[in-house]
Image: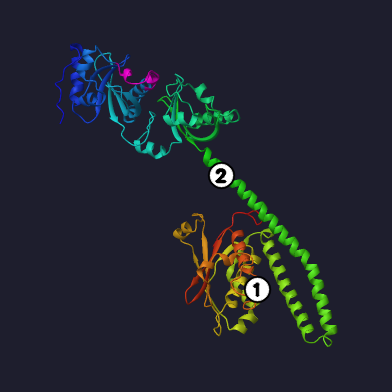
Amino acid sequence: MDKVDTYQPINQEKETTKEAFFKEIALGGPSLVAMIRLPDLEILFVNNQFGRYLGYTNADIEMAGGLKFTELFEEYLIDRLLYQLDSCKENSTASSQYVIYQLKGKNGHVAPFYLYAAPLSNDTDEHLYHLVLHPEISRWSVPFTSFNSRELFLEHFNSESFGTFEWLIDVDKVFWSVGVYRIYEVDDISEQINNEYAASFIHPDDRAKVAMEMKKALTSGEDITVEFRIITARKNIKVVNTILMAIRNKEGNPIKFAGSIKDVTDQRQIEHDLKNKVEELNHSNKELEEFAYVASHDMQEPLRKITTFSDRLSEKYRDVLTGDGLMYLSRMNASAGNMRTLINDLLEFSRISKTGQPFEKVNLDMILRQVKTDLELTIEETGTVIKSQQLPAVDAVSTQMKQLFTNLITNAIKFHKPDVSPVINIEASLLSESEKQRHELEINTDYYKIQISDNGIGFESEYATRIFQVFQRLHGRSEYPGTGIGLAICKKILEYHRGIIFAENIPETGARFTIILPNRQEQKAGKI
């Protein structure tokens, strides 16, 4: 434990005031303590911790014939300290707020300190202030700008692209943290800065916007966030995001601006590139959809001719054609039928995002009844059993919901196990908050989860995503007929409705398809 010095007044005439001060503050306390006097900021008293950290004791000060606190930091920060002292004299709550200074010790070493200040009451005309300092020992490079709490500071100061600033309006002094110098690429951190110099970095096209936001901060009294471009000292263009706040005195007059700056150049560039890629992808998808629509539509006419002439050939020459000839004609008719089915599926796929039908409240129970009626013959022939809970009503395009359920139920019937009648279970529930987070859906939107499970042959789990791609088939056409577009249509319908669909293989049981649909659609059809 350090030895506590015997208190020795610097001179006798100051003894009364300093004795009162000494009674309040122990010489060996944990904080650095000093008493200073305006207007020259002369140090009248320091405690042992002050001497331990900064090297100046009361004896050193008396031997040197006095020491001014301004000798401990750069001259351009004098206005900053005077402003702090004046603030805590006018407003008692200001004494609980700190400012961070880089202070130079007797040995020339510079280190950051939190500095709190409060005026001392005395019976003389002297303007005395009590200073309490705490060393800043965090791993962050800390600026001298003030914050209400260290936690608030560390919350914001989490990267090298962040800085803080203050502009003292009356004296037109601007103070930047090290981070701002780094963002603006200004090498001389001792540069005395005023508002004109700081504003000179703002891109000419953005100056009017920044001026308008500063005016808004003055009139509204609220924190303002503004994003603008700067041209750095090295002539690089950057994008910065600034939070700005106007500080007022007790009369309500603005006395300073304080805020933070974050370099978001890389982030905005990534967003810009991503936006361009999305636009390119959307354009490419649109072209592909238009191509599929036009190609499928144009193929209808030659296909009709092939079908017509093959039918005539079959009717007129059935008795003449035998053996291979009859077999070739039969295969041609079958291929024409497959082509017609494929074209119709492609047209259906391309029409999904072109529909002009508005979203309306659709009762999915009614949709299911319609689908069961349409598939009545198939259900009867295969002995299919469909069990369903009550389904919700959602904002949707009715025809697309019918297409969705038709495709999924047809799919479940088609891929049943040999000699086993298909059993299809349909369940519905409201999506939970945790499920919304897991699927990265909007938390404030209600979603319904509809699961369609079957007892069919299932599929290998590795193909759970592939089966939703166009023309992807896991089985030969001779085993299970179809074009390989049905599930791709389902996926596109769900995307159009801002929902999702995915499939799971349930070992030794079958497949389960999960549909997630929002309860309400905010946008009109064709605008998503």
Question: In the visual, does 293 lie left or right of 272?
Answer: right
**Can you name the residue that lies furthest to the right here?**
316
Magenta-drawn stretch, dominant element (helix, strand or loop): helix
- The answer to which of 19 and 306 lies nearer the viewer is 306
Question: In the visual, does 126 lie left or right of 182?
Answer: left
- The answer to which of 398 and 191 lies nearer the viewer is 191
Q: Quadrant of the N terminus?
A: top left
Give the magenta range: 68-80
Numbered mark located on residue 271 in the image: 2
Can you see residue 514? no
Rendering coords of residue 128 (x, y %): 28, 18
Quarter of the image for residue 316 reads bottom right
User: In the rendered image of this protein, does residue 56 appear above or below residue 374?
Assistant: above
Measure the C-alpha gap from mark 2 to mark 1.
Answer: 41 Å
Rendering coords of residue 227 (x, y %): 53, 35
- N-terminal-most mark, 2 or 1: 2
Q: Which residue is label 1 attached to?
A: 482
Can you see residue 310? yes
Q: What residue type is labelled 1?
A: Gly
Numbered mark located on residue 345 in the image: none
Q: How many marks?
A: 2
Q: Which amino acid does label 2 sit on?
A: Glu
Rendering coords of residue 218 (x, y %): 49, 29
- Tell me which residue sits at (62%, 84%) in the image: 381
